Image: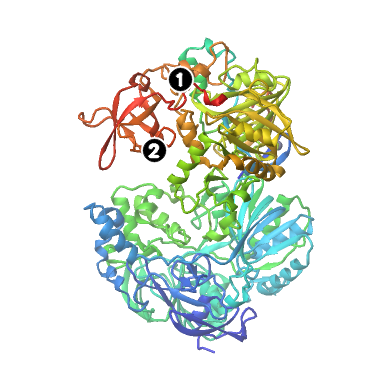
Amino acid sequence: MFLINCPYCGERDQSEFSCGGEAHIVRPKQPTELSDDQWAEYLFMRKNIKGVQFERWNHAHGCRKWFNMVRDTSNDKIHAVYKMGEKPPVE
Amino acid sequence: MTKYRVNKTKHVDQTKTVSFDFDGKSYHGFEGDTLASALLSNGVHLVGRSFKYHRPRGIMSCGSEEPNAICQINEDTDLTEPNVRATEIELYEGLKASSQNCWPSVNFDIGGINNFISSFIPAGFYYKTFMWPKSFWKKIYEPLIRWSAGLGKSPTKPDPELYDHKHVHCDVLIIGGGISGIIASKIAAKNNFKTILIEDKNILGGSTIFQKNENYKINDKYSGEWIYEEIAELKKLDNITIKTRTSLAAYHSYNYLLAKENISDHLPLDKRNGGIRQRLWKIRADKVIVATGAIERPLVFNNNDRPGIMLSNSVKKYLDFYGVSCGLNNVIFTNNDSAYETAVSLKEKGISVEIIDIRKKSNSKIVKNAEQLGVKIYWNSTVVNTFGLRKINSIEIMNLSEDGSNVVGDKNRINCDCLAISGGWTPMVHMHTQSGGKLDFREIDQTFIPNEIDKNHINVGSCNGDFELEEIINNTNKKVKNFLKVSETEFDNTSVLNSKELDKRNIWLLPNYISEGKCKSFIDFQNDSTAKDIKLALREGFKSIEHVKRYTTTGMATDQGKLSNMHALGIIADTAGVKMGTLGTTTFRPPFTPLTFGSIVGRSVGNFFDITRKTSIHEWHIQNDAKFENVGQWKRPWYYPINEEGLHDAVQRESKAARDSAGILDASTLGKIDIQGTDASEFLNRVYTNAWSKLGIGKCRYGLMLNEDGMVYDDGVTTRLGENHYLMTTTTGGAANVLSKLEDYLQTEWPELDVYLTSVTDHYSTASICGPNSKKILTKIFPDKDFSDDAFPHMSYQNGKIDEINCRIMRISFTGELSYEINIESKFGKSLWEKCIEAGKEFKITPYGTETMHLLRAEKGFIIVGQDTDGTMTPIDLQMDWIVSKKKYDFIGKRSLYRSDTIREDRKQLVGLLTDDPNEILEEGAQIVSDMSKKPVEMIGHVTSSYFSPNLNKSIALAVVKSGKKLNGQKLIVPMENKNINVTVSESVFLDKENKRINA
Ligand SMILES: [Zn+2]
């Protein structure tokens, strides 16, 4: 059970949060210009790696804010938490 | 006093007698006893039968590692509980316990026949024997296994007791109140850390508390006396919460731990007073100090499972803590020095004891002490057999060969009534590994010890591999100081005297003159797996420890392999010729000791199991005999039967009334989202498939929302309340998800939009009145308002007032009838409803439930998201092309509507179905086929909604069918169990295709 440092509220129990999958996948600004393959890449393809992963999390039972988190999926270590729109920290 | 109660101790009050029943017989023990110590004091060792062979088994240990003494307590009461360890349950007046896993009695057990046919039930026998013939499984094998392998009976009545959950935070949590835990707690509490100490026993002090031996002294006191004083001081400190009878169940990441506190399990049933029985502590600790100690290992030799064969340190605890001698004629069988403490304790009390040691010598102080007391020691020897049917009566020993791989010389028979065995110690690393920690293998004493990298927890004492008193005290002090950044402690200059173990020898599987195939050398006592089974699994090709474990079931019983895992690993390593450290261990999973279901669910039982949401009009529905259905967490009126009416009749009546005169529906549960901001219109453009910019203030519009994959996600009517203000409605079940989804887009994809979303579902109650007389009813409720079609057209909204209360009136329709919805602040919902009923009386206004609502909308071919759609339907599939804007550049899901897959013409599409026999009602979910002759028969779709329409006087259905759009007018078949129903594909709008009724 993680202890997650919400960038707006501070440390809270994992049960207050929900995970929204891989981060930094930007919705294409002009979807109609994309081929089926390009659109499918955006729509379906997600990484699921063992190691450091960038994820979206939502403080669903708290401030309801979305933010990003860098987590090592092999040991659940949370390396960083940062607001939406902010650049991911360079390792 | 019985002859086995040989000693007075301060932990058992021998002036207070406690009577209890075991297997129907009455016994006496004392206050302070466990069930196990009380049984032993009465000379009772035989307490159960083993799982597979039904061999007689006795009490083996004094703690949670106990594999054999598993009882059913308080049978035939609603408080009965299976799988209770006799070694852990505190004795109380009137306790009734019985053996599990034996029938008809523990002394005569039919299943014991398995013992004689054991060569036919080797490792993996479940997988091999019971595989075929397959037809035998249900009628023969499964009942047989269930009958013969009973592991207790679950209660048949509801649990009358209360359970509780508690969340706590602390600076330092210490797990285990033995000597290292006490030292750590004192340091933490004295240095202003908010400290919690949990201990699973009812008293602190671990195995040190009953230590009284010249060879183990701290500051010139017996270690037992020293710790007694330390505990007394600890209890006086302010910063510490001490929780005894509290066992750690799980250690999750980020120092989140679960511990179960037993509050009333030790009290007689009549003193429990209906209070809380157990409390589950959910602890988030800044730092955790694990001090869970070590478990003594058994030795693996032929017939090592007879009643009377016990772990050596447990024998010592029964003697020195409970005052009970497990035998009067004891033999100790060991490979290490610690068992000599047991020997010295016994001898000092004048009880007969001899020692068999597999080592060739040992020159430590404690061994010399035993020798001086006249204890006979057989060096370099091993037990090769044991005898005695219900309790051990003698053993056979032989000398070991030089390398220990064989036995040599003559057999020597020794009589005994208790054999205390010790194979060394296994650090309890469960907590460390549960938290994600790794282990290192230590060759010298063949132990896995914690490899600490996590900065927020440490292991101290014997769970860290420190077994000797001096190491324990000094290393614990040093580690805790570092961990808590404390420079000085009271333990810095503690003088410790202890006997040091100098000689070691370990043999995982002791050799025998009897061939291996004929030996019964048990590794897992509860699951009956032997050394032979492990070797067989290896021969059959299982290599990974995880596979061997599952194939032989070693370590899979309720004790989770606490006694068996190390020997299984050792024997695998020896047999396979690999280093034990390279094998790794099996995964230690929570819970460390079993949790009760009660403690897991806590207060979330009965009405509190899940939230029930009720509208403000709920009471009225109850008073008017509504039947309810669950929609998400909401209770919604399903139908309102009159005079014993069934569902069908009630719905027919309600449906007819709604179309002929007037009906009223509680629509409060629909999701309502208040949308405000200068970009609100643009936002709606992006989330709905249709266009919103030109919707006038005061107008309503139906919208369809897709997922990014183009599939229909939700629908509802949104009303423009002002220039920058909308009220969106969603489906009842989808409300929360829609809000999160919209928030997600707003925050992450379109942060530039000035839009604010607020859920107002609970803020407003909604009465929906429909039918040709609805306008007249509204006119009565709002006499000042002009309800003419010009002044108040369909799909528009106006504010209104009932008395002084503001409300919103929307003229929208989900039934195809002339229809109005009145929204009012929830607290006035019921009075609004009653007002509507009153005003509608002269028109026989009929309240209707969800079933009638579904029927009415189906007559009009309106979809219900989630019933007629299932996450694979696009608006095009639903034949709702009209709602998809061609002009808008983008909206959620737009691009997906022309992916190669979504433009396929043979997708399943929504159509209407009419049965050839108008009285035949199709079953929802029924499959649809077109050609019954071609096998296998292709299923081309299924029925999604089906009703008998009283207004059309025939059966109607909606269905999704492959290429359905092209099939209008075609005949299809709905095959049912006993007949084929012929149907014709129709349009999905059955009633009022011209939409005249809406303005009727
Ligand atoms: Zn937050």
For label 1, the crowd category at 10 Å Cα-Cα, with few meaning under 14, some 14 to 19 and many 20 or more, is many
The residue beneath circle 2 is B924
Q: Are marks 2 and 1 on the same chain?
A: yes
Sequence-first disc among 2 and 1: 1
Residue B977, numbered circle:
none
Q: Quadrant of residue B119?
A: bottom left
For label 2, the crowd category at 10 Å Cα-Cα, with few meaning under 14, some 14 to 19 and many 20 or more, is some
Q: Is residue B844 above or below residue B881?
A: below
Q: Nearer the viewer, mark 2 or mark 1?
A: 2
The residue beneath circle 1 is B876
Q: Identify the subunit bearing mark 1.
A: B
Q: Residue furthest front?
A: B842
| Labels in figure, total | 2
Image x and y of residue B758, in percent: 69, 33
Position of the C terminus of chain B by quadrant: top right
- C-alpha gap between disc 2 and disc 1: 22 Å
Q: Quadrant of residue B511?
A: bottom left
B745 sits to left or right of B863: right
Image x and y of residue B450, in percent: 57, 51
Kind of residue indicated by mark 1:
Ile
**Toward the viewer: B337 or B210?**
B210
Image x and y of residue B304, in percent: 38, 70
**Toward the viewer: B472 or B134?**
B134
Position of the N terminus of chain B by quadrant: bottom right
Ligand 1 within 8 Å of disc 1? The answer is no
Q: Is residue B722 above or below residue B775?
A: above
